[in-house]
Image: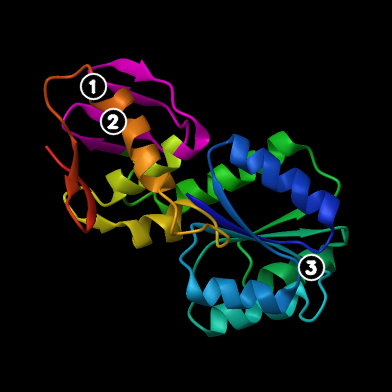
Amino acid sequence: MRILLVEDEAKIASFIERGLKEEHYVVDLAYDGEKGLFLAEVNTYDLIIVDIILPKKDGISLCREMRSKKIDTPILMLTAKDKVGDKVLGLDSGADDYLTKPFAFEEFLARIKALLRRRRSDKGTTLKIADLELDQLTHRVKRQEKEIALTSKEYALLEYLMLHANQVVTRTMISEHVWNEDFDSFTNVIDVYVNYLRNKIDKNFKKQLIHTIRGTGYILKE
């Protein structure tokens, strides 16, 4: 899943980004509200995390503008302000949840998972094709009931392929959703990671699930 983090304090942003990546999330960073709004408009995110105090455009204004532009992605608001009135203002601006700094990272992750679970409650959180299963909340992957250990990037790539099972996905589509905005699309990194996945998902199984569409991209199908 891909998350947009809008936070102007570099140390906090780095800490959150590192922790989210360890949990297999793809993270884009914006250090001001204007950049945050731009990224939210041009990319598709599963969750947006917004600090209230931001340069150029504050978090409250950012939330209001995103909602006015019909961006319905769940928003978790972060702030050092802990008064009830501040929380109400944040929620009224369009945020779905509110967390006061400083916070325990375990609670932060729990809030994220709750928002993502709520968003996908109508679809379920387990992706399945043939005998391959991926749980989006626990990040566990198994095939024929055998658990498969994946790196963060391998997991993100497999999740994207499974979300688009039976559809051809191009390398450009993969780069935009599995890597962050700074990714160099002219490298062969995507092909390398697809091979990594094949070695773990397909190599020791009779039925191959990941197929190459020559000159276009890949498809995950039975």
Magenta-span inclusion, residue 150? yes
**Residue 203 disc label:** 1
Q: Foreground residue, 9 or 169?
A: 169
Q: Is residue 191 above or below residue 67?
A: above
Percent coordinates x, y for residue 168 in the rendering: 20, 56
Mark closer to the observer (2, 3): 2
Q: Which residue is mark 2?
A: 198
- Inspect the magenta stretch and tell me whether residue 35 lies in it: no
- Mark 1 vs mark 2: which is more N-terminal? 2
Identity, as a three-letter code, of the amino acid under mark 1? Lys
- The crowd level at tag 3 (other Cα within 10 Å; few <14, some 14-19, many 20+) is many
Q: Is residue 93 visible?
A: no
Start-end of magenta stretch:
127-153
State the residue at coordinates (45%, 32%): 139
The answer to the question of whether label 1 and label 2 lie on touching residues, with beta carbons closer than 8 A, is: yes
Q: Amino acid at mark 2?
A: Arg
Tell me the residue at 88%/61% (across/down): 81
Q: Residue under circle 3?
A: 52
Q: Position of residue 58 (x, y in %)?
A: 78, 76
The residue under label 3 is which amino acid type? Ile
Residue closest to the eye, 106 or 163: 163
Mark 2 / mark 3, whichever is N-terminal: 3
Q: Tell me: 160 left or right of 82.
A: left
Residue at the location (39% across, 43% down)?
157
Residue 83 pos. (x, y %): 88, 62
Whether residue 108 sits left or right of residue 207 in the image: it is right
